[in-house]
């Protein structure tokens, strides 16, 4: 890696000899590096290994930040993970090769590498988020993600050769033993960084501030420790410049942390317009609510209430009733409806439609993110749109991931409604496993209704999965209508109603009539989809597939 012992003329003293030993001769042309002062070799070696430990932890945090941000901004988490990991590993190899030119002054080079890495990794989240908000949302962000990953990976790759050189300068020893200690510190640091990211940094600080704090730790632990140990390597002027550079990096990161809130607000306004009424990060997702009534918004300038999750529109206030009526009312007709299980639906809009049925005695809502139900209760506009449904005494809310909850709960329900995404990159909630678990929660005469996205392959894949779970199905569509939101969800959403016996599409005569549905329009939409059904349904999607 750094010292190829036994290959060519040695550039170091014999093994076991300290650099200041009388017998430690430096061959002609070799570069003598001063030993660390004010610290015994054992203490100096431990500090270098500690720097390797901290730098490895920071490096893995940067990598996980890029993976999480790529999936959040660009979607398709599997693709973004593959891109980040492959580019990162390739760049680390490039950085290791380039580091061979830096080993003549390893302490100075390591300080420069760590300052550059702290600055690049610390600012990466804000830079990529700004690219996503102000530039082309896919191409610019994709190019920025690849570029940031390559630069961070190259700097990380340069660390190990430089650290190996520094360890050998402190105390000459067998290269295999030195590599074992260095890689042990590196791998343990990576473990700590990998655990700290999801359990400490992300929930406590968020992605942007977490990356900035990581950069500051990286600069202090990497550059400062080595500069203190090996401060005799650079000239006094160079040493002063290195300390000033490290301080400048810390000041830059601190200023960026102070401006993070303003940058996020400006980016949200660029994305969503000026009427952003609520924004938060929760459960690894960004929830943004815009438009709607407000004390400082004149009625004539009031924008439609819109709800976004991870930058993608999920609710358009004036239009949402068509989708939620189509999901709920056919499932609650022609059968028992006392106990209803609503998977998802944290915005309270499908719940509003369920509670319009007087025969419903209990509704259990399983939402994976507590922030959205809290918003549906507390925000004036969203609460009014949802009819203050979470205040109804018949409602019980459970915060859990729906698939995990289905695996552990054993209650049965007359109706199961899946108000979950069906047309994004995460298709977990359209698989045979998910529908099979949901089927086990059905009472003998129960029904299940699920979203299957816009007309197309998704509806047939959903129907195939429900049939593979042992149910009989009928697909149908929401009523068409005008669109009031420029970035609203795709129109013409489809659904599948399923039961153990062939379900009948109708409406409950005892419930208030929906605004957009009649039995005739339901039957007509089912007929149109039946005419488009392929002769052979596609293979049902599975978690492994």
Image (tube, helix red, strand yellow):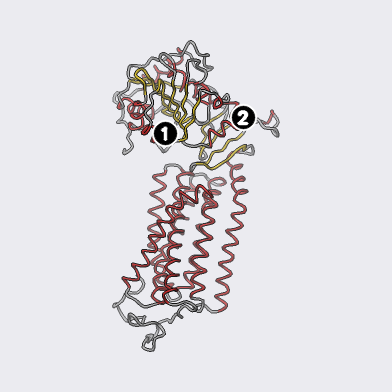
Residue 453 percent coordinates (x, y)? 43, 29
In the image, farthest residue toward the top: 509
Q: Sequence-wise, which precedes: disc 1 or disc 2? A: 2
Give the residue at mark 1: 402
Label 1 and label 2: CA atoms lie apart by 27 Å
- On the rendered structure, is 186 left or right of 278? left
Judge whether 45 appears above or below 142 on screen: below
- Quadrant hosting residue 155: bottom left
Residue 256 percent coordinates (x, y)? 59, 55
- Front-most of residues 264 and 537: 264
Give the residue at mark 2: 381
- Image quadrant in which the C terminus is located: top left
Helix, strand or loop at mark 2: helix
Q: How many numbered badges does the structure rendering display?
A: 2
Tag shown at residue 535: none
Judge whether 88 appears above or below 380 on screen: below
- Front-most of residues 533 and 262: 262
In the image, farthest residue toward the bottom: 22
Residue at the image position 43 percent from the left and 59 percent from the top: 153
């Amino acid at each position: 890696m750094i010292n190829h012992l036994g290959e060519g003329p040695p550039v170091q003293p014999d093994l076991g000899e300290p650099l200041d030993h009388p017998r430690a001769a430096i061959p002609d042309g070799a570069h003598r590096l001063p030993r660390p002062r004010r610290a015994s070799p054992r203490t100096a070696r431990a500090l270098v290994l500690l720097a390797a430990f901290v730098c490895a932890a920071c490096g893995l945090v940067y990598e996980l930040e890029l993976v999480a941000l790529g999936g959040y901004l660009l979607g398709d988490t599997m693709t973004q993970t593959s891109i980040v990991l492959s580019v990162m590993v390739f760049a680390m190899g490039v950085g290791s090769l380039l580091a061979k030119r830096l080993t003549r002054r390893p302490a100075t080079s390591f300080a420069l590498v760590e300052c550059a890495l702290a600055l690049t990794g610390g600012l990466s989240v804000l830079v990529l988020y700004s690219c996503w908000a102000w530039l082309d949302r896919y191409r610019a962000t994709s190019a920025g993600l690849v570029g940031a990953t390559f630069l961070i990976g190259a700097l990380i790759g340069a660390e190990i050769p430089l650290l190996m050189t520094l360890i050998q300068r402190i105390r000459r020893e067998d290269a295999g033993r030195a590599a074992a200690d260095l890689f042990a510190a590196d791998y343990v640091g990576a473990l700590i960084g990998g655990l700290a990211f999801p359990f400490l940094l992300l929930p406590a600080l968020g992605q942007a501030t977490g990356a900035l704090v990581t950069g500051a730790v990286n600069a202090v632990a990497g550059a400062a420790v080595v500069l203190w140990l090996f401060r005799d390597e650079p000239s006094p002027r160079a040493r002063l410049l290195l300390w000033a550079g490290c301080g400048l990096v810390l000041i830059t990161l601190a200023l960026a942390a102070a401006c993070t809130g303003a940058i996020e607000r400006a980016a949200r306004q660029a994305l969503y317009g000026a009427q952003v009424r609520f924004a938060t990060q929760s459960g690894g997702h960004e929830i943004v609510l815009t438009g709607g009534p407000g004390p400082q918004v004149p009625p004539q300038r009031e924008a439609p209430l819109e709800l976004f999750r991870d930058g993608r529109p999920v609710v358009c206030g004036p239009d949402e009733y068509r989708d939620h009526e189509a999901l709920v009312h056919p499932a609650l007709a022609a059968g028992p409806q006392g106990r209803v299980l609503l998977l998802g639906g944290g915005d309270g809009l499908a719940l509003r439609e369920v509670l319009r049925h007087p025969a419903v005695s209990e509704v259990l809502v399983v939402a994976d993110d507590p922030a959205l139900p809290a918003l549906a209760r507390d925000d004036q506009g969203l609460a009014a749109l949802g009819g203050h449904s979470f205040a109804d005494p018949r409602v019980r809310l459970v915060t859990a991931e729906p698939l995990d909850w289905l695996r552990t709960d054993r209650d049965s329900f007359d109706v199961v409604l899946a108000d979950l995404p069906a047309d994004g990159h995460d298709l977990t909630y359209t698989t045979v496993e998910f529908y099979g678990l949901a089927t086990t929660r059905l009472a003998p005469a129960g029904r299940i209704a699920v979203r299957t996205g816009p007309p197309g392959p998704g509806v047939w894949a959903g129907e195939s999965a429900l049939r593979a779970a042992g149910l009989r199905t009928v697909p149908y569509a929401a009523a068409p209508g005008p669109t009031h939101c420029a970035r609203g969800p795709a129109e013409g959403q489809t659904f599948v109603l399923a039961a153990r016996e062939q379900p009948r599409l109708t409406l409950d005569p005892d419930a208030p009539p929906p605004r957009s549905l009649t039995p005739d329009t339901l039957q007509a939409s089912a007929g149109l989809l039946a005419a488009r059904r392929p002769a052979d349904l596609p293979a049902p999607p599975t978690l492994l597939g």
